[in-house]
Image (spheres, rainbow, N blue to C red):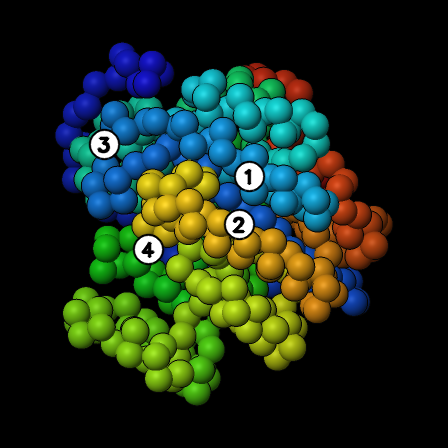
Amino acid sequence: MAPAEGFTTMASAPYRRSGREIVPAEPVKYPKDAGPFLLVIVDTEEEFDWQSFSRSACNVGSIRQQVRAQQIFDRYGIVPTYAVDYAVAAQEDGYGPLRDFLNSGRCGIGAHLHPWVNPPFEEDVSARNSYPCNLSTNLELRKLTALTEMISRNFGVRPVLYKAGRYGADAETPMALETLHYEIDCSMLPWTDLTPQNGPDFHRCSNDLYWFGEGSRLLEIPLTTGLVGGLKRVGQGLYWWLDSPLARRLRLTGAFARTGLLERIRLSPEGNTLSEAKRVSRILLDHYGQRVFTITYHSPSLEPGHTPYVRSEADLSGFLEWIEGYLEFFFGELGGVGSTPAEVFRLVAAQRQGGGGGSAAGVSGLGAVCVTCSPGELVSPPQPTRAGTAE
Ligand SMILES: [Zn+2]
């Protein structure tokens, strides 16, 4: 990939961050009867071998296939957010098809950091360094700066939504987000401990949205995850143990799921059946009052052969049927509405400030232009924005 040229690879000095998780500063409050809202956030990236990492694996040919899901979103009036990484933002095969969606108001654009294909290239390429939060805070910031500027240059908008590659965010990540004036983070993976793979520990993280960072200006929107089964009341602690290397070796996660004792289900067509997704959504809405639901998947899944979830055309048909089936369920049986991260930001920011544009009705406008990014000024220095002005 051309933009990678000119950067050298050098071993980084040993560096340790705190390893702490992001600390919620303030829970989000909603207007009465708001939602439930559905967001779609796509990890939009190159096709790569999920078992190993390479600076040269930058093919983004699968981006042109995004239209297959986009047509479904268009039909239901959903405006997805494509959180794009550097390989997508830097190459015309990547940004071209998405810019067409953006220019017609059919999507928003966020940032997704895959360190191994995102300059500057100073760290060793390794599984550990594939998590942005394992880099020095300075290198994490400079990589995110390069990504933000590449998105600004080729999309003509400045992203304000961040999703860390491999969910690699920790307590120090907000510093980079604040420096670059991001407003929304989607890097939390509830009830999940990634430390056995050298990633962060989210086992105490729930689905609740919250404000965090300096002045509580950043909004966290976690990936919707449910624990269901007979042991769900103790599931939070139990799943921490089920993520351990020993429990994985003994295949206990599968055993607990098969026996109905405990299952962790994410709102994604990748590895979760439609009936599971419906079941967990119903539980989260009815028993926990969840207001915001987020669907996610990886963009290469829309072309067979790139991810473990879609190996054939038949898999792809099933994948698309999952998306359509879930939208039908959410807007029908659940009585939900489509929204965008920016609209949710505006709603909860206005609610925190005590009104003024925070009505649920204002957010439920399907087909409203989604802005997960700021239009205008391309690579000029970012201007501070007030909370509540996600556009
Ligand atoms: Zn990714």
Q: Is residue 160 above or below residue 154?
A: below
Is the C-beta of the residue carrying label 2 under 8 Å from the nearest atom of ligand 1? no
Which residue is the site of mark 3? 54
When asked about the image quadrant of residue 249, the answer is bottom left
Q: Is residue 205 above or below residue 98?
A: below
Residue 314 lies left or right of residue 58; in this view the side is: right
Q: Is residue 181 above or below residue 357?
A: above
Rounded to the nearest angstrom, the CA distance separating label 4 from label 1 is: 33 Å
Rendered location of residue 159, percent (x, y)? 56, 32
Residue at x 47% of width, y 78% of height: 228
The disc placed on residue 68 is 1
Rounded to the nearest angstrom, the CA distance separating label 3 from label 1 is: 28 Å
Residue at x 70% of width, y 69% of height: 333
Q: Nearer the viewer, mark 4 or mark 1?
A: 1
Residue type, label 4: Pro
Residue at x 70% of width, y 32% of height: 105
Rounded to the nearest angstrom, the CA distance separating label 4 from label 2 is: 31 Å
Which residue is the site of mark 2? 320
- Dot 1: within a 10 Å radius of its alpha carbon, few (fewer than 14), some, or many (20 or more) residues? some
When asked about the image quadrant of residue 381, the answer is top right
Rounded to the nearest angstrom, the CA distance separating label 4 from label 3 is: 22 Å
Mark positioned earlier in the residue sequence (3 or 1)? 3
- Dot 4: within a 10 Å radius of its alpha carbon, few (fewer than 14), some, or many (20 or more) residues? many
Q: Nearer the viewer, mark 2 or mark 3?
A: 2
Rendered location of residue 386, percent (x, y)? 68, 38
Front-most of residues 30 and 41: 41
Are the residues tagged 2 and 3 within 8 Å (C-beta)?
Answer: no
Mark positioned earlier in the residue sequence (1 or 2)? 1
Residue type, label 3: Ser
Residue at x 35% of width, y 16% of height: 3
Mark positioned earlier in the residue sequence (2 or 3)? 3
